[in-house]
């Protein structure tokens, strides 16, 4: 799957590389001569196209010319050639496996292309940048951005390729091992429907284009789903059909991918004679055209084949070939990295030379500028002095305005504070009036009690009089509670607290305040019930209603409300 996916990426936007044997020296020299002629005419884009369509030239030579193309494009201020070269440099690093450098160059190409409306280059850079990511959403967003660019640029060929690639992105999400372990991913039917819709769109566009490469790629995508669903006969038939179109277009890696997938199916079906025949064909093709990465994959298929058939000696032989091929590929990769480091060093030296020349030119410009400035120095200082005076006046005006606004704010705050003090005084005054009323009640009660006591002393005590005294004492206790309330309210913090409640919760009544006073004073449920001469159930109802009025959560108490108030007023 990864190899086929890479094939689609490298095909994108006419950047398909020819997978051929090392060309003869005479042909390589002919290509280099052609590049020299194009350099003379400053045809930078055509040089990039040669590199994008030829894999036989040495990496050092390709990189050196590409750097020259960048410098020439900047010198000529040819933004299209500059964006095209950054895209080609990104392809170069992508093939070398350096995703970071590839990403940087694709991003530069994308930025320039977006600025100047080079939609074909914008689509290519956005798509290639997206394919560097392994994240499904990042890749999908990048490809969607690319498809919009191709629509604007009316580039139907690459529009069809991107549609096929988006469809394959949905397919890979299902075929990957990640799908089996991630329970949050959507059902397979969703990804299949999305994939098929993009395959059909690509096929519809290709009805006019008649591109064998796109047709073969789309057919391979359908074949993979048949294989995934274990419809092996249909899968083999479809892979073979894809081979026909891919051979016509010269897309040899696509042909090899089809053959290796067919061989895998034959091994799964235990059709060993058919499997070894297809593997031998693929092995011969990969050897003839020196396609090393696919040769390594074919050796892996040989190992599976011989292990399945019980020929462990042959399996061991291909295991050695597989290991040796991997070593060769890794060594080649390491050597390339050394060459790339050297080329980067040379590039830095060239940039230093360019920067030195630029400084010399800048010095000349500065010298001329100084002469001009000296000639107009007097005028400059007069204008500057006048500007300073104007700025000074502006600053003074700003300061005066700020001071004025600050004074207005202070006056407004002072008015608000005075209003608040008035309201607090009114609140305290009301409580003091209540306090005075309670004192009067108590004095009246004491006078009445004296009278009753005298009557008792004169006439003797009977049960009715005793009951009347009990009722009188109950009223006294109630009045005592009122006194405790007033006493509590006389405390400044309590005054502020109940003032705060009256403002924040207008529905709170005097009776609610009295109940809250008793609770905050630490009275038990029984004590409060006796004070109100009600049952504990009725008291719970009163508490519940009070909690609702105060918007208290289940885990918060009345004491928490009071503590919160104290914290806020510190």
Image (spheres, helix red, strand yellow):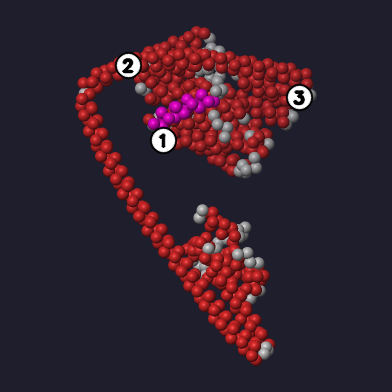
Label 2 environment density (alpha carbons within 10 Å; few <14, some 14–19, many ≥20)? few
Give the camera-side residue of 135 and 545. Answer: 545
The Cα atoms of the two marked residues, 3 and 2, are separated by 74 Å
The Cα atoms of the two marked residues, 3 and 1, are separated by 53 Å
Label 3 environment density (alpha carbons within 10 Å; few <14, some 14–19, many ≥20)? some
Q: Nearer the viewer, mark 3 or mark 2?
A: 2
Q: Where is residue 433 in the image (x, y as percent from the top left)?
A: 48, 72
Q: Are marks 3 and 1 in contact (CB under 8 Å)?
A: no
Q: Quadrant of the N terminus?
A: top right
Does 95 appear above or below 268? above
Q: Position of residue 241 (x, y in %)?
A: 60, 30
For the point 72% across and 19% down, the residue is: 319
Q: Which of marks 2 and 1 is in front?
A: 2
Res. 84 image quadrant: top left
Find disc 3 in the rendering and name its residue. Answer: 307
Q: Earlier in the sequence, mark 3 or mark 2?
A: 3
Q: Where is residue 106 in the image (x, y as percent from the top left)?
A: 48, 27
Residue that extends furthest to the bottom in the rendered view of this protein: 459
Q: Residue 363 carries which label?
A: 2
- Residue 100: say if magenta: yes
Find disc 1 in the rendering and name its residue. Answer: 152
For the point 50% across and 8% down, the residue is: 26
Magenta region: 99-115
Q: Is mark 1 on a helix, strand or loop?
A: helix
Does 358 appear above or below 164? above
- Residue 322: say if magenta: no
Q: Which mark is residue 68?
A: none
Does 466 appear above or below 15? below
């Amino acid at each position: 799957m990864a190899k086929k996916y890479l094939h689609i990426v490298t095909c994108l936007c006419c950047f398909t590389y020819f997978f051929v044997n090392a060309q003869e020296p005479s042909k390589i020299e002919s290509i280099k001569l052609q590049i020299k002629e194009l350099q003379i005419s400053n045809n930078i884009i055509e040089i990039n196209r040669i590199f994008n369509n030829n894999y036989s030239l040495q990496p050092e030579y390709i990189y050196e010319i590409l750097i020259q193309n960048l410098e020439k494009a900047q010198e000529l201020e040819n933004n299209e050639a500059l964006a095209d070269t950054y895209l080609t440099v990104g392809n170069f690093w992508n093939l070398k496996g350096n995703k970071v450098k590839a990403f940087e160059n694709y991003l530069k190409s994308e930025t320039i292309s977006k600025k100047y409306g080079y939609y074909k280059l914008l689509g290519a850079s956005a798509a290639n940048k997206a394919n560097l990511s392994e994240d499904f959403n990042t890749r999908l967003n990048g490809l969607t951005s690319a498809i919009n660019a191709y629509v604007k640029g009316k580039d139907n060929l690459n529009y069809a390729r991107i549609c096929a690639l988006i469809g394959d992105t949905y397919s890979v999400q299902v075929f990957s091992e990640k799908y089996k372990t991630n329970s949050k991913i959507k059902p397979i039917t969703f990804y299949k429907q999305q994939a098929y819709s993009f395959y059909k769109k690509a096929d519809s566009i290709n009805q006019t284009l008649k591109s064998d490469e796109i047709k073969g790629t789309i057919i391979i995508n359908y074949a993979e789903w048949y294989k995934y669903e274990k419809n092996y006969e249909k899968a083999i038939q479809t892979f073979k059909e894809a081979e026909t179109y891919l051979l016509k277009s010269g897309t040899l890696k696509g042909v090899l991918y089809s053959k290796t997938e067919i061989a895998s199916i034959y091994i799964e079906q235990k059709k060993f004679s058919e499997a070894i025949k297809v593997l031998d064909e693929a092995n011969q093709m990969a050897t003839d055209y020196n396609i090393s990465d696919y040769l390594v994959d074919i050796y892996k298929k040989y190992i599976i084949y011989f292990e399945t058939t019980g020929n462990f000696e042959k399996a061991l032989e291909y295991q050695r070939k597989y290991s040796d091929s991997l070593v060769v590929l890794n060594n080649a990769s390491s050597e390339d990295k050394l060459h790339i480091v050297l080329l980067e060093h040379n590039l830095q030296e060239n940039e230093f030379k360019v920067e030195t020349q630029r400084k010399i030119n800048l010095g000349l410009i500065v010298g001329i500028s100084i002469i001009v400035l000296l000639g107009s120095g007097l005028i400059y200082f007069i204008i500057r002095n006048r500007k300073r005076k104007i700025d000074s006046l502006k600053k003074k005006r700003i300061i005066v305005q700020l001071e004025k606004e600050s004074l207005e704010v202070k006056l407004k705050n002072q008015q608000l504070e005075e209003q608040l003090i008035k309201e607090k005084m009114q609140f305290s005054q009301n409580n003091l009036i209540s306090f005075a009323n309670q004192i009067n009640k108590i004095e009246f009660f004491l006078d009445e009690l004296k009278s009753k006591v005298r009557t008792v002393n004169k006439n003797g005590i009977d049960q009715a009089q005793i009951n009347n005294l009990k009722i009188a004492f109950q009223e006294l206790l109630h009045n005592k509670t009122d006194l405790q309330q007033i006493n509590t309210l006389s405390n400044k913090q309590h005054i502020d607290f109940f003032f705060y409640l009256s403002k924040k919760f207008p529905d709170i009544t005097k009776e609610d305040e009295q109940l809250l006073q008793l609770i905050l004073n630490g009275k038990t449920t029984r004590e409060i019930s006796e004070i109100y001469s009600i049952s504990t159930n009725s008291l719970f109802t009163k508490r519940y209603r009070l909690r609702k009025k105060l918007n208290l959560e289940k885990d918060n108490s009345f004491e928490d409300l009071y503590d919160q108030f104290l914290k806020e007023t510190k």
